[in-house]
Image (cartoon, coloured by chain):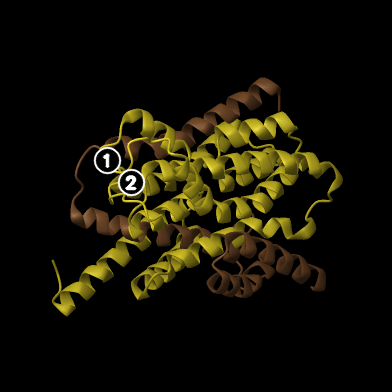
Chain colours: A yellow, B brown
Amino acid sequence: MGRPISNDGRHGPKDPYHVGFVLDGIKAAWPICLGYLPLGFAFGVLAQKAGLDLLDIALMSILVYAGSSQFIAVAMISGASAPASIILTTFVVNLRHLLMSSSLAVHLHGEGKGFLSVFAYGVTDESFAVNMAKFRDGGWHRYQALAVNQMSNFTWIGSTILGGYAGQSIPAGCYGIDYALSAMFLCLLTFQLRGRQYFLTAIISGVATIGFALIVPGNGFVIMASLFGATAGFALKRYAQRKRGSYV
Amino acid sequence: MFKTEYILLIVGMGLVTYIPRYLPLFILAQRNLPRGFIEWLDMVPVAILSALVFSEIFLSGPPRHLDMLQIKSLVAIPTFLIALKTKSLGGTVISGMILFWLAEKIS
């Protein structure tokens, strides 16, 4: 903050490992971490109930690192689903990151392959929401963004292991653990409601989700509804711009 | 599930999760994107999050069906208001969990 960093984030101070960047990242990431603690804890408890040991939980959190799909995978493991169908479901559920990475790419224009491959690992609903808001406000450096990703990542891994450990002494369904994920999504949604157009897009996308969920079998309905909602929202925005004559 | 099978499962899940995260960054960060596409991308986050919220709170199952008035959706109203008011991720998650827990106890 307050440092002379330009919007594309590549003309700031020379030292990319500037301690201040990490601190800024931590400052921006702490609400995510605070959200991940109960969420990761909840996941750990549920995973332990499904028969995963601490090492299994840690491995999944490190290699997959995608909250909602981890919850779904654990539910499928308890239901004795075939590994292939668990992997396919994970793929479909996490395909939304494709859209998030596409949005982030606008702000990481011209970065090296090494940085991008590390950064990609940490793209989640939450880090995406925070980093996009920061990039949009301007003055956000790629290393600050990476610090947000990794702080969230470490918190997630730690809290899931903690949950797995504590799960041995916590009864199933306790303390509203089943609601952690819904509450997280609700809060992230409110961050995105930055005006009427976004609000309308949310409604369209939400209603479309219900529609697709009831008509289309399988787990693809979230992606379909997201694409539909974003496209409808974009069309509405364009229409409004044309009507006001401010179309560019 | 056997240990090796589990490891394979995790590695598979990891791969299919990482690839969609990586490919757009790798492909798109190297070139200039058309303005319309960027504007469309701007609508993507709100659409995704709303889709996730609706699927979490209004759907029940399996078998999947619409359930407008369930504890999850009713608790979503105060949770949503708390999120709007406090703008705190941690606070919202914890209040949502407590509200859900209480609502389940009462019902």
Instruction: Give residue A65's quadrant in the image.
Output: top right
C-alpha distance separating marks 1 and 2: 7 Å
Q: Are marks 1 and 2 in contact (CB under 8 Å)?
A: yes
Q: Residues within 10 Å of mark 1 (few under 14, many from 20)?
A: some
* Residue holding disc 2: A102
Q: Is residue B51 visible?
A: yes
User: Disc 1 marks which amino acid?
Assistant: Leu
Given the image, what chain letter belongs to the residue carrying mark 1?
Answer: B
Q: Nearer the viewer, residue B16 or A164?
A: A164
Marker disc for residue B28: 1
The residue tagged with tag 2: helix, strand or loop?
helix
Where residue A13 sits: x, y (%)? 33, 41
B79 sits left or right of A107 in the view:
right
Marker disc for residue B50: none
Q: Nearer the viewer, residue A18 or A100?
A: A18
Given the image, what chain letter belongs to the residue carrying mark 2?
Answer: A
